[in-house]
Amino acid sequence: MSAHEITLPAPAKLNLFLHITGRRDDGYHTLQTAFQFIDSADILHFSLRHDGQLTLSPDIDGVLSADNLIIRAATALREATNCTLGANIRLDKRLPMGGGLGGGSSDAATTLLALNTLWETQLNLNELAALGLKLGADVPVFVHGHAAWAEGVGELLTAIEPDEPWYVVLTPEAHVSTAEAFRHPLLTRHSEAIKLRDLNAGVTRNDFEKVVRTLAPAVDEALHWLTQHGVAKMTGTGACVFLACSSQGQAADILSASPVNGFICRGQNRSSAHTALDHWLRMHRI
Ligand SMILES: C[C@](O)(CO)[C@H](O)COP(=O)(O)OP(=O)(O)OC[C@H]1O[C@@H](n2ccc(N)nc2=O)[C@H](O)[C@@H]1O
Ligand SMILES: Nc1ncnc2c1ncn2[C@@H]1O[C@H](COP(=O)(O)OP(=O)(O)OP(=O)(O)O)[C@@H](O)[C@H]1O
């Protein structure tokens, strides 16, 4: 393994609950949520270039390379640090897109972590998270890499240690635009703020569920079906829905009976991107 190359995963997240507590003057919504990572991930491979060029392959259908959050993250890091190096980046896209699993945000965070290492730009995690926040509200939690209680627009993070259960995640055939969900006239925008200690008191929900169920009947059906087996929730602004299970076997049984496609995975309080980066740093004795 060369010190000029690094391969890191970009894991997905689940929003264990999501309450919208208000709207700021700039139109952005304040929220409370709990993020936990799962062991399903995109894989990104980075190799250093000295000529300043940035390449990404393969393309994602429908996303221009310049709009890809990976290229945007790399460019933001280069500009913030006046770095003149470049990279060839390979993306093995495994996570469903636009499903509320945060794949694009996680790709951006993994890119910041990887290139900050390869380019030796030496930003700390707070500085990388601040850069990431400009790319999307979900990027900071992936940069910090720990399951978190989040407030503000998702950037005020407190590390938490929820159980790490097996989950069934269903991926209904629906695309829900995050911006459209946030501007829906019927969205609940004034949920009462709860305290971190109330997290497990059974009082949480995802405030987007009501509007997304009307916008996307496939999400409504998936939630309806999964609810037979326990407390099913949607993640982010959908479309994916999930259920915590008591064992891997139970998760597999529920998935095999499901009329909707999906996968099973394990909750993780530490991001696999950080675990892999620590391993790489140990191998290179940095
Ligand atoms: C729903 C969540 O996924 C929960 O984790 C996030 O809050 C969404 O984060 P994200 O996908 O990174 O969203 P962004 O790309 O930052 O925002 C997309 C659009 O959603 C709206 N938006 C987003 C976040 C927020 N707190 N309030 C908003 O009103 C804005 O119109 C924004 O232009
Ligand atoms: N590297 C990337 N991977 C995925 N999507 C990207 C990427 N770069 C840009 N995008 C754009 O971002 C959109 C949202 O992708 P993503 O998979 O992060 O959605 P999501 O899981 O719903 O995220 P969130 O939960 O943050 O709303 C895509 O539809 C695509 O247009």
Image: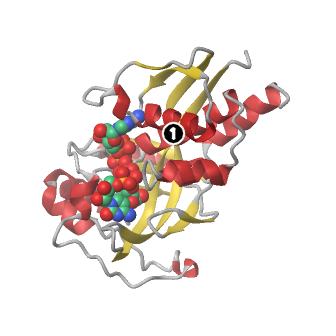
Residue 196 position by quadrant: bottom right
Percent across and percent down for residue 102 are: 42, 47
Judging depth in this view, the residue of 96 and 226 nearest the camera is 96
At x 25%, y 44%, the residue is: 260
Judging depth in this view, the residue of 232 and 211 nearest the camera is 211
Judging depth in this view, the residue of 120 and 18 nearest the camera is 120
Mark 1 surroundings within 10 Å by alpha-carbon count, few (fewer than 14), some (14 through 19), many (20 or more): some
| Horizontal side, residue 262 vs residue 246: left or right | left
Percent across and percent down for residue 12 are: 47, 44
At x 28%, y 46%, the residue is: 258
Q: In the picture, which quadrant includes the C terminus?
A: top right
| Horizontal side, residue 209 vs residue 273: left or right | left
Whether residue 126 appears in this view of the structure is yes
Residue type, mark 1 in image: Ala
| Mark 1 sits near ligand 2, with its Cβ under 8 Å away | no
Q: In the picture, which quadrant includes the N terminus?
A: top right
Q: Mark 1 highlights which residue?
A: 76
Tell me: residue 156, above or below residue 251: below
Whether residue 242 appears in this view of the structure is no
* Element class at badge 1: helix
